[in-house]
Amino acid sequence: MAKNSSKSKLLPIYIINGPNLNLLGTREPEIYGRATLGEIEKLCAERGRSHGLSTIFLQSNKEGELVEFLQEARTGASAVILNAAAYTHTSVAILDALQTLKQPVIEVHLSNPARREDFRHLSYVAKAATGIIAGLGVNSYLLAIDAVAAILAGAPSKKK
Ligand code: DQA
């Protein structure tokens, strides 16, 4: 089947994952599910392809490295999907990096932080996110890709 030519020119979606997400599969599966990060990466690539979009899937346990991924995204990405994990709730450095982006940013979480401990209720990422998808396990990532596809296709969105 012929590729959609306008979409195939788009830069990839950066899907950026923060600390401890490399342990998915064995890390608190009752909260985060049993899918490994590698399995989530594959599903994201497939979902991206179904929209004619490519994905670059990244993970780091280091705050500064996450900031560097976001700086790369300024010129390398058409959109960013970010699960900053615990740094969601603490990192002004990640918020500052997000605020330099002109692209859509979707904050994702496997769990629903609003239902969990009070310290998870504050999200610095949310202050710079176009939208937030949380609590749906792996589907949070897949729905974020659907959202990015809709935004890039020109669906009305409030910001970015
Ligand atoms: C998380 C939620 C965060 O509060 C937590 O620190 C994580 C994972 C999630 O995907 O549900 O590491 O971002």
Image (cartoon, helix red, strand yellow):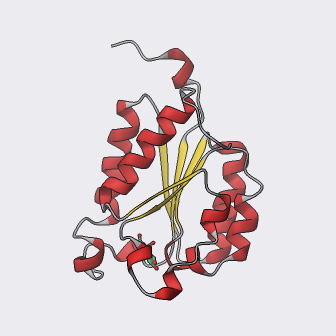
Residue 51 image position (x, y, % from top left): 40, 30
- Name the one closer to the observer, 154 or 65: 154
- Name the one closer to the observer, 1 or 159: 159
Image quadrant in which the C terminus is located: top right
Q: What is the quadrant of residue 40 in the picture? A: bottom left
In this picture, is 51 found above or below 68?
A: above
Residue 142 image position (x, y, % from top left): 36, 48
- Ligand 1: quadrant of the figure: bottom left
Residue 10 image position (x, y, % from top left): 58, 30
The residue under the point 47% across, 44% down is: 55
In the image, 59: left or right of 122?
A: left
In this picture, is 3 found above or below 144?
A: above
The residue under the point 52% across, 16% down is: 5
In the image, 98: left or right of 120?
A: right
The residue under the point 61% across, 66% down is: 125
The residue under the point 55% across, 40% down is: 12
Image quadrant in which the N terminus is located: top left
Residue 85 image position (x, y, % from top left): 49, 74
In the image, 4: left or right of 136?
A: right
- Name the one closer to the observer, 46 or 97: 97
Q: What is the quadrant of residue 134 in the picture? A: bottom left
Q: Residue reaching furthest top?
A: 2
- Name the one closer to the observer, 139 or 6: 139
In this picture, is 89 found above or below 155?
A: below
